[in-house]
Image (spheres, rainbow, N blue to C red):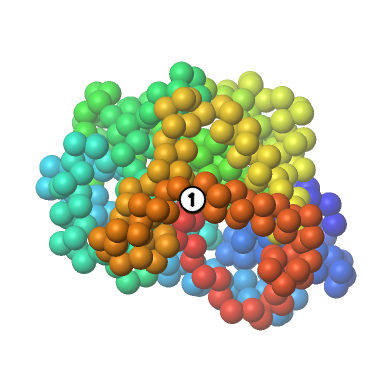
């Protein structure tokens, strides 16, 4: 089954063409399940087939497995959304405004018609660097504990029960000029403003640089720009993430159309373009046009290039774990080349010269152990050896060390575990 048909099934609620799923045979449904597994999209598949009236044509074991995944995703997303709202309110009261990013930001804005359909693993927040001590105190008072060593983009994740929070001091770096995008820019009124959806009594959105009002939803335009950046530059997890992000944009398209607000789509595009992400927005919107067989807003597709759209469609094709890893190596190399010098230095420092406490945690040393200093000399060799091993697994993928290259699990597999680093 071709990738375009698989994507249309995943977005069946909005696709103009009618899929003859009642006539699909067992091999066709096997292909659907392989794609859904590779894309981690069972909750999306369930919601879309249900709303399109196709669920009765789905084989019963698949439909039941997708329903369980959707229920688990709904429960997780409700917990994440509730905690994100409560946590941002607590931070604002303590004098440390914060804004949600990625999945929970889309939930707060009401972009997803069925929030349980979008697989989400954690709460991402962007704060002001000067508020670090306040943010840490609020998290500690709420019972959060450090989960593991952090990445270069955010503090070490903190966990309380099943909820994981990642705190960012800047949302992303702009492709336009390489500057880091702070909270002040993320709460700018472009693309609908932080007061989008708020009652008229709240008044006009705050000026650029002002902290978000207590309880105000995230700014729509910068949220969309961050998601585009995360797909192509930050995490570089294509093709797996491309499908979920394509669904984000399908929901965003429906959200904009339902609001019927003059110029909203253009303001979103302007926010994305001012960060140098117009071409990437064009690729996503152009692919969405092909899948849904209906036009996207012209301002979203004005920078679209046919070659980019074709490449993104190719990347969406479900692949083995080894092929996915090979694509990530190429994408991450290209993304590193595009990074501004400041980000390159931060990335190299994160891997080669992490703080002693982080290095002790990585190698299982006791806190305060003096043996950590010798690890700095051997760490480059360790990283090079690990990279060589990863490369060997790409060359010989069908080994016991590469379970991702095996066949996907049957529909009755255990529910998906939440990835602490997921979007």
- Where does the image place residue 210, in percent across and percent down from the top left? 21, 28
Identified at 48% across, 31% down, the residue is 344
The residue at which mark 1 appears reads as 379
Q: In this view, does 30 lie to the left or right of 244?
A: right
Asked if residue 404 can be seen in this view, the reply is: yes
Asked if residue 29 can be seen in this view, the reply is: no
Q: Is residue 229 above or below residue 248?
A: above
- Where does the image place residue 298, in percent across and percent down from the top left? 62, 24
Identified at 79% across, 55% down, the residue is 395
Identified at 85% across, 72% down, the residue is 26
- Where does the image place residue 222, in percent across and percent down from the top left? 41, 33
Q: In this view, does 160 lie to the left or right of 22?
A: left
Are there few (<14), some (14-19), or many (20+) residues within 10 Å of tag 1?
some
Q: Which residue lies furthest to the top in this view?
A: 177
Q: In this view, does 273 lie to the left or right of 48?
A: left
Identified at 56% across, 27% down, the residue is 338
Q: In this view, does 211 lie above or below 139?
A: above
């Amino acid at each position: 089954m071709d990738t375009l048909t698989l994507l249309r099934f995943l977005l069946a609620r909005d696709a103009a063409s009618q899929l003859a799923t009642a006539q699909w045979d067992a091999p066709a449904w096997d292909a659907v399940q392989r794609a859904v597994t590779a894309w981690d999209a069972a909750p999306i598949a369930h919601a879309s087939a249900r709303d399109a009236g196709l669920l009765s044509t789905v084989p019963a074991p698949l439909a039941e497995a997708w329903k369980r995944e959707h229920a688990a995703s709904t429960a997780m997303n409700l917990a994440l959304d509730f905690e994100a709202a409560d946590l941002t309110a607590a931070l604002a009261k303590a004098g440390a405004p914060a804004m949600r990013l990625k999945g929970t930001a889309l939930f707060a804005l009401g972009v997803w018609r069925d929030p349980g359909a979008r697989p989400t693993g954690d709460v991402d927040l962007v704060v002001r660097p000067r508020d670090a001590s306040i943010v840490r105190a609020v998290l500690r008072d709420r019972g959060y504990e450090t989960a593991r060593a952090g990445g270069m983009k955010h503090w070490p994740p903190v966990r309380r029960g099943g909820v994981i929070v990642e705190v960012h001091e800047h949302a992303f770096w702009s492709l336009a000029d390489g500057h880091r995008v702070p909270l002040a820019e993320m709460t700018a009124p472009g693309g609908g403003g932080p007061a989008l959806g708020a009652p008229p009594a709240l008044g006009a959105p705050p000026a650029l640089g002002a902290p978000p009002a207590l309880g105000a939803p995230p700014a729509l335009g910068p949220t969309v720009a961050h998601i585009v950046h995360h797909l192509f530059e930050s995490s570089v997890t294509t093709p797996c993430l491309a499908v979920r992000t394509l669904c984000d944009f399908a929901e965003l398209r429906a959200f904009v159309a339902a609001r019927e607000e003059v110029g909203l789509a253009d303001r979103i595009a302007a926010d994305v373009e001012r960060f140098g992400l117009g071409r990437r927005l064009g690729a996503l919107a152009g692919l969405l046009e092909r899948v849904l067989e209906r036009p996207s807003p012209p301002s979203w597709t004005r920078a679209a290039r046919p070659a980019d759209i074709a490449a993104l469609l190719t990347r969406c094709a479900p692949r083995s774990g080894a092929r996915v890893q090979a694509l990530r190596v190429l994408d991450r190399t290209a993304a590193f080349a595009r990074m501004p010098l400041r980000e390159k230095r931060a990335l190299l420092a994160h891997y080669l010269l992490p703080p002693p406490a982080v290095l002790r945690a990585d190698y299982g040393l006791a806190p305060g152990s003096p043996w950590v200093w010798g690890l700095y000399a051997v760490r480059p060799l360790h990283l090079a050896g690990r990279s060589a091993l990863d490369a060997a697994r790409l060359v010989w993928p069908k080994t016991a060390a590469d379970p991702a290259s095996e066949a996907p699990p049957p529909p009755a597999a255990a529910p998906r575990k939440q990835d602490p680093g997921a979007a």
